[in-house]
Image (cartoon, helix red, strand yellow):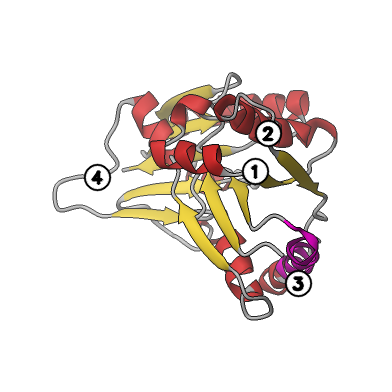
Amino acid sequence: MIEKIYLIGMGPGDPKYLTLYAVETIKKLKLFLIPAKTGKKSDLTQMRKKIISFVKRKKDYRIIEIPFPERKKGDKYKNLVEEWREIKANILKNILQKETEKEAGFIVWGDPSLYDGYIEIFKNLQKKLNFEIEIIPGISAFQVLSAKHKISLTQIAGTTIFTTPRQLRKMKNIECNTVVFLDNYKTYKIFANSDLKIYWGAYLGTEKEVLFSGRLKDIIEELIRLRDKLKKEKGWIMETYFLIP
C-alpha cells in the first residue's frame, strides 16, 4: 500500500514554472498519479506527463492515469461537489490499497492549496486509510497573469479579494482588486457598464497563452467573442481575470 502521497503543484503548465521543491520531489519518486482526461481535454493529461518527463529524463517511473468521472450539473452545487469528491476518494482508495510502491506523487495543476479539492479529498481519505500527505506548493495562474500584465494586485492600505463566479454574482459593487477563477458564466457581464478595468488571461503559462485587458465597458463584447472562439477551437478553457476599480 502507498504510505505517503505528495500533492505536487505543477504550476500553470510550462516546466519553467516548476519550483525547485517540486523538481526535487518529482526526481525521487517512482510512481505518479494523474487524472485522465479524454477528447480535447486530453491536453490536461499530456501536460502533466510533460512535466514529469521534463524532470525525470530516465524512464524509471510509472504513471497511473485515473479516469475520474465528470461532476454532475445541477442546482445543489455544494452537494454535487461533495458527492463527486467522495467518488474520487473511493477510486483513490482502491489505488492506494493495491499499490506496492510506498510513495507516489499526485500532480495538481497550479497550486494545490488555492483552487482545488484534492487536499480535502486526501485528508478525508486519511480517515479510512493510514498514509501521510505532503503538499508541494506551485506557481498559480493568477501570479503569471499579474506578471504578464505587469501589475500589482495590492494597493497601499488596500484589500485584494480572491473569489469564484458564484460569489461574484452576489457582489453589487467592486471596490477593491478582485481575482476571479474559471468563469464559465462570463460573470463580468454584470459589471458591463462600470468603469472597472479587466485583466484577463487564458491557458496561462502554456504555449496557447492569450492575454487581454482594458476598460470593461469598452472591450466586453470583444472579450466575449475571443473567449467563445478559443473555447470552441480548443474544446476547453482555463482562465483567470482581475477586476480593478
Label 3 neighbourhood size at 10 Å, few (<14), some (14-19), many (20+)? some
User: Badges 4 and 3: C-beta atoms under 8 Å apart?
Assistant: no
Q: Nearer the viewer, mark 4 or mark 1?
A: 1
Q: Label 2 crowding class (10 Å Cα cut-off): few <14, some 14-19, many 20+?
A: few
Q: Earlier in the sequence, mark 1 or mark 2?
A: 1
Which residue is at a point 78% across and 43% down the rendered structure image? 36
| Picture disc at residue 30 | 1
Foreground label between 1 and 3 = 1
- In what element is the residue under mark 3? helix
N-terminal of the two: label 4 or label 3? 3
Q: Is residue 101 visible?
A: yes
Find numbered disc 4 in the image and state the secondary structure of the residue it sits on: loop
**Residue drawn where x is 78% and y is 45% of the image:** 65
The residue where tag 3 is placed is: 83
The residue nearer to you, when weighing 243 against 203, is 203
Q: Which residue is mark 2?
A: 60
Q: Check disc 4 and report the residue beneath it.
A: 154
Q: Which segment did they paint magenta? A: 84-100
Is residue 129 placed above or below 214 in the rendered structure?
below
Which one is nearer the viewer's eye here, 164 or 47?
A: 47
The residue tagged with tag 1: helix, strand or loop?
loop
In contact (CB < 8 Å): disc 4 and disc 1: no
Residue 140 in view (yes/no): no
Amino acid marked by disc 3: Glu
Say left or right for 8 vs 64: left
Single out the mark in the foreground, 2 or 3: 2
Residue at disc 2, secondary structure: loop
**How far apart are the alpha carbons under marks 1 and 3?**
31 Å
Amino acid type, residue under disc 1 in the picture: Lys
Of marks 4 and 3, the one in the foreground? 3
